[in-house]
Image (cartoon, grey):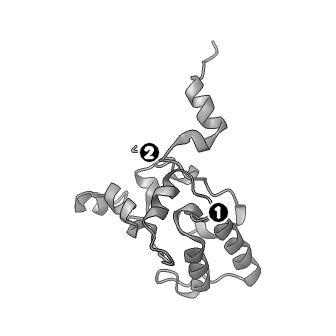
Amino acid sequence: MRRLIPLAALLLAASPALAGDDWVPPVKDPLVLKECGSCHMAFQPAFLPARSWNRMMDELSRHFGEDASLPADKAQAIRAYLTANAGDVVTKGRARKYMQWVAPGGTPQRITENPDFERKHRFPDKVWQDPKVVTRSNCPACHRGADQGWYEDD
């Protein structure tokens, strides 16, 4: 017996822009997925403005306490992808809300310090201390579809 897919699901799959405020365009670039995703989830570039990604790429030798330096050609390709898909360029869904909180000219480096993130993640300390969560930047711990850009309340 064939399973019928509801029309709403088809519309959302056909046009992620219709998905609403819980979606951001997922990372599709294989190099970004490989290089950034080898240490943490490859965060969607729409969560930060291009100037933040430029700063982050300039400071890879001290990337949140780690040396994440890359060969120049890889760094250049990753920078191009991140800045072309940044939140001040692609303003859809959740990214639009995040960008409202970024100060003009500001260069935030942590998605988790955005007031929109903080507002939606006011949890007791025990949540952040759970061994399955550990850090505020471990989005997939609570959002099973985070790597695909889905941040609905799981």
Label 2 element class: loop
Q: Residue furthest top?
A: 1
Q: Secondary structure at mark 1?
A: loop
Percent of width and height locating residue 37: 59, 65
Q: Residues within 10 Å of mark 1 (few under 14, many from 20)?
A: many
The earlier-in-sequence mark between 2 and 1 is 1
Q: Which quadrant does the N terminus fall into?
A: top right
Q: Is residue 13 left or right of residue 80?
A: left
Residue at 46% across, 49% down: 151
Q: Residue at x 51, y 83 (%)?
A: 66
Along the line of sight, which residue is nearer the eye, 105 or 38? 105
Quadrant position of the C terminus in the picture = top left
The amino acid type of the residue labelled 1 equals Asn
Q: Nearer the viewer, residue 53 or 142?
A: 53
Whole-percent x and y of residue 104?
49, 74
Q: What residue appears at the point 58 percent right and 83 percent down from the top-left corner?
A: 60
Is residue 54 placed above or below 146 in the rendered structure? below
Residue position for label 2? 152
Which quarter of the picture shows residue 136?
A: bottom left
Residue under numbered circle 1? 85
Amino acid at dot 2 = Glu
Q: Position of residue 124 (x, y in %)?
A: 22, 58
